[in-house]
Image (tube, rainbow, N blue to C red):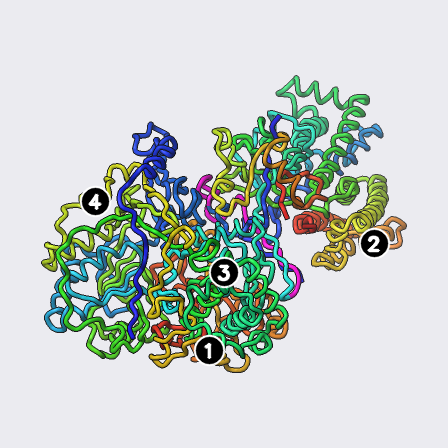
Amino acid sequence: MLELVTTRDNPMIDPTMHVWGWEIPVYLFLGGWVAGSMVLAGWFMRQGRRPGDGCVCYVLPWVSLLLISLGMGALFLDLEHRLYVWRMYLTLQPASPMSWGGWILLLVYPVLALSALVSIPGDWLERWPAVKRLAARLGEATASRTLGHANIVTGVALGIYTGILLSSLGARPLWASAALGPLFLVSGLSTGAAFAHVISRKPGDQATLLRADNVFLAVELLLIGLFLIGLSTASAVHANAAALLLGGPYTAVFWVFVVGLGIVLPLAIQTLMASHRIPHTLVAPVLVMAGGLALRFVIVSAGQYSHWISP
Amino acid sequence: MARFGMVIDTRQCVGCMDCVVACKVENDVPDGFCRDWINQRLEGTMPDLRLTITSERCNHCDRPPCVSCCPTGASHVHEPGKVVLVDHGKCIGCKACLASCPYGARFIHPEGYADKCTFCIHRVEKGELPACVAVCPTHAMHFGDLDDPGSGLNRLLASRRHFVLKPDAGTQPRIFYLE
Amino acid sequence: MNRISRRRFLKIAGFGAGAAAIAAGTSGRLGAMGRQPAAGETRVVPTYCDICFWKCNALAHVRDGRLWKITGHPDDPLSRGRLCPRGTGGVGAHFDPDRLRAPLMRRKARGGEEWVEVTWDEALGFVAERMQQIKAEHGPEAMALFSHGIGGTFLKHTLKAYGSPNIAAPSFAQCRGPRDVGFELTFGEGVGSPERTDIANARCLVLIGSHLGENMHNTQVQEFADAVATGAAIIVADPRFSIAASKARHYLPVKAGSDLALLLAWMNVLVTEGLYDRDYVEKHGFGFDHFSAEIASRTPEWAYPETGIAPETIRETARLMARHRPATLVHPGRRTTWYGDDAQRGRAIALLNALLGSWGRKGGFYYPSSMDVPDYPYPPYPASARGKVDNPGQRFPFASEAITTGIREATRTGEPYPVKGWMVYATNLIHALPNEAETLRAIERLDLMVVVDVIPSEIAGWADVVLPEATYLERYDEINVELFREPFVALRQPVVPPPHDQKPNWWIARELAFKLGLDAYYPWTDIEEYLDHRLKGAGLGLAELKQRGLVRGPPAPLYFEDGVPAEFATPSGKIEFYSTQLAAAGFDPVPRYKAPEPGPPGSFRLLFGRAPVHSFSRTQTNPILRDAMDENELWLNASVGARLGLASGEYVRLRNQDGVLSNRIRLRVTEAIRPECVYMVHGFGHTARGLRSAYGRGASDAQLITRYATDPLMGGTGANVNFVTLEPGA
């Protein structure tokens, strides 16, 4: 029999770690959504879609600006020493994914702003001739493609760095997986695609986005599988962490809400939608997006609960 | 270059918490928080029982994950001594360092910054011992320079079986426990 | 019949080269004391601690006018420069937000805890008036003082000047009394406080019912750790696997209550196998033949079913003790009031040590010494016509000190004569005395109940007048003339002023004396004059002590081999293996074992002890110590827990054999305790409303101690005779 007694009872650390509440999963979800939106918008821009032709890729930047601001608001609320937040921007710490993230977020704004600017009708900008000229230049073919590339690159960075951040915190063995970064990116792509599919006005784009979302959902399943297998076959510490989702306290919420309702069910529905067996319905995209939110909450909560079990 | 560490004799330690109380008073640790603590590990069945008592704190690791994860550089390795410290004025309270520590050694101070054992660097720089080491009534605690081959620490490590906490976490802690 | 033991110690007069040499060595380090600090600097003031009775010498640090921390005095032979966790947290006593602030008088019925703040003049005037009334109607003996610690000195002086001989400390009848009497009956003197145990030099240390390491008597814990480090053979007998047990070479999980059987069996082995110190016994012993005949039948086989310890283990451990004699110390324990046969058990420990030849030998029991500091020349105290009330007719013939529960009984019954007034200093009688109901019934009979305390304790709640004392960090006190391995004199002096209207004990005692017309007994004008006068009588002075904190005297011989005369203040003048005075009084001349009464089926014997971060019931509101431990736990055997479906962390209430229900207490279900007993740390479960930060935290063992077994030899109250059942879902 093993009995462990401690005199420590520090807030947020004991009896299990819980330093991050709702703010971080909400930011991760919004950030992933924006990342996915940026990659998709960028892809359309690369295809040569011009402003004014009703492509969803010129609507998404506006939504993303709102969402990323909300996300950063959540991040700011999470900080315990808020007045010092500007310290993030006096340095770049090469080994700290959170430092990279701070700068990536800073980069996201101008990319989104320029992408949004392009979609503003020329006569609305009469009062600012320089801005009008800039918007026109960006709308040209090559600039549009460059802007598209910028969106894709920035979107990928935004979508993947958070997973890398979590995986760099080795003390939380549930997060110690190279699959986590790609998983968050693909989940963000899936969320972005689902949303874009809903707001798109062009049937051709809708179909493309639907098929893309199905691919993303399938890849997500694959990555989740690799994630769990990888942890379960690593050390005892990591297997113990994975067990939280494989019989432990987080099993039900993970398999029902994240996998079942968040991926498998909408994938089935959307597959049927894509082959026109059933009419289009909002249910599936909403499930996809809710599933993305659930994924963040479960991973963040279960990850903090996991700990290094060896003495 | 100096590399400060500790050697703690679990045989001498009676788990009296003098180290915890002294640290609290010396460093004004807020009510409800502690920078160091006592763990007891009891194994076996009556009467064949084995108790291991460890006085624990930040291990000032050689590979500190709390330093690499910090986005502002607030968490840093201080020279001389390679003591891991937090610059309060740079800390934004993001808590990545709390999540990165396998030992749970850090906490958020009510004033908002990340806080933990500092090896009483303010005392060490004046030639004194950390408060916990200085107070231990059973002389179970030893502090010194691990890079000094002649230091008392290295003599103790050479002469007794010892362990560190969670060696497989890969942080290379600098607090050694004599069995 | 009545044996008053004489404390024998060697007094060292004057200060020769020894003292000067010690002074020269330390002046460098202590030079900072007394000098005015610059801004931002720390002022260091030496004093001695009061969190427990050990009185370690300390250095209090004041930074920017605010009390900062307390560290050990580097020259202190008690603490060796390192305080225990309670002393280290002592600043919390000064900052405790729950502490008493001003004199209080009760507004309604006793115990209602409703007060009105008054001036010292009013409060002391009231007390004096009532005391004069009591004296007129019942005689001065009708006023009793319960006092704990050196801070009671001046109050005792006032009470004696007033004419009362009824002064008692709970530490005799509720704590160490049995073992002191047991040793007095055997060696002619008691064990002392601090105990004269030479743990530092012991090669074999036997702890039976002693939990050193959780019991934080500083010097002993330090010496214990040294013994562990140097590979001394440690044997621990305890129904609970204590910290000390975890360091032992041999851990014997004795059945609760069977310790005396184990002791007798050990002695049987030593005698039967001829392993005892023959020369020592021949030279110093009396009645050995009777003794060996008596214990001949107390074999390990006989002890096995009583104790649960295998006969081979009993033999092996006895042989181990013999191998290291005379440097084998069987620790006398401290709180030894367990089952009512405790003085005899204390005697058994004394006898075991005598067989091993450890008394007066290195590694066993040394002879302590103290410095010669003359008392202040007071007029003689008035003689009492009626004598003390606590032990009428000497019904406890071997009680060598006053019996607190005897005074309580006289108060409750009015026999042999009424006691109408109680003054209580620094002892929370509700937690210290067994059976709270008797204490409350006694208090009902009083015309005056005065409590002097630092915190609004449970006993203060029952007072007519509560007088707030300044903490040790805020006051002068009697000088400590320590009786120890190395003698010294120490000063307690104020470090910071009291934050409110609290006063030192000497001031309270003196002002009361003035109001009682006893000015003749306080001829000194202020405390510094008193202290300086006494110190000058020893060739020292107050200025020197204020600067240095303590002055050590030259060490005196400790052991017989160094020249201490091997004299024993017993009737035979020798170590009494057979006690004729016990036989004459109708008691067993050699201890005999009788198993204690078992409890009702399904119940557990309630055992209790100490935590290293708390003292009694007096530190639970100290914010620093409360942060270290804010509630106690109930230790319950793991198999029992499994059977009852209880796990660690759950809360239960305890109901004792008389139906008393405790406050909720958290469980610790563990392998480390035998199934027939449960264990908790003493001093929690506070019910005094003024102790806000400790109110309702944990459970009170004292509340559950409604039965006690009175020791017929000396009146000690054995408290380990209560049984509890568990009520889950609290």
Regarding mark 1 in the picture, which secondary structure is present there? loop
Q: Residues within 10 Å of mark 2 (few under 14, many from 20)?
A: some
Is B107 on the left or on the right of C164, as rendered? Answer: right
Asked if marks 1 and 3 fall on the same chain, the answer is yes
Q: Residues within 10 Å of mark 1 (few under 14, many from 20)?
A: some
Distance from disc 2 to disc 4, alpha carbons, whole Å, reads 101 Å
Regarding mark 3 in the picture, which secondary structure is present there? loop
Chain ID, mark 1 = C
C114 or C13: nearer the eye?
C13
Choose top left, top right, bottom left or bottom right for residue C301. bottom right
Distance from disc 2 to disc 3, alpha carbons, whole Å, reads 70 Å
Q: Which residue is mark 2?
A: A269
Residue drawn at (30%, 41%), measured in percent from left and top?
C495
N-term-proximal mark, 1 vs 4 = 4
Labelled disc at residue C592? 1
Residue B69 inside the magenta-drawn segment: no
Q: Residues within 10 Å of mark 4 (few under 14, many from 20)?
A: some
| Front disc: 1 or 3 | 1
Q: Which residue is mark 4?
A: C537
Regarding mark 2 in the picture, which secondary structure is present there? helix
Decide: marks 3, 4 in contact (CB < 8 A)? no
Q: Position of residue A134 (x, y in %)?
A: 70, 20
Q: Position of residue C681 (x, y in %)?
A: 47, 63
Look at label 2 and name its amino acid. Ile
Regarding mark 4 in the picture, which secondary structure is present there? loop
Chain ID, mark 3 = C
| Front disc: 3 or 4 | 4
Is C511 on the left or on the right of C177, as rendered? Answer: left
Decide: marks 1, 4 in contact (CB < 8 A)? no
Q: Which residue is mark 3?
A: C211
Asked if marks 2 and 4 fall on the same chain, the answer is no
Residue stretch rendered in magenta on the structure: B22-45
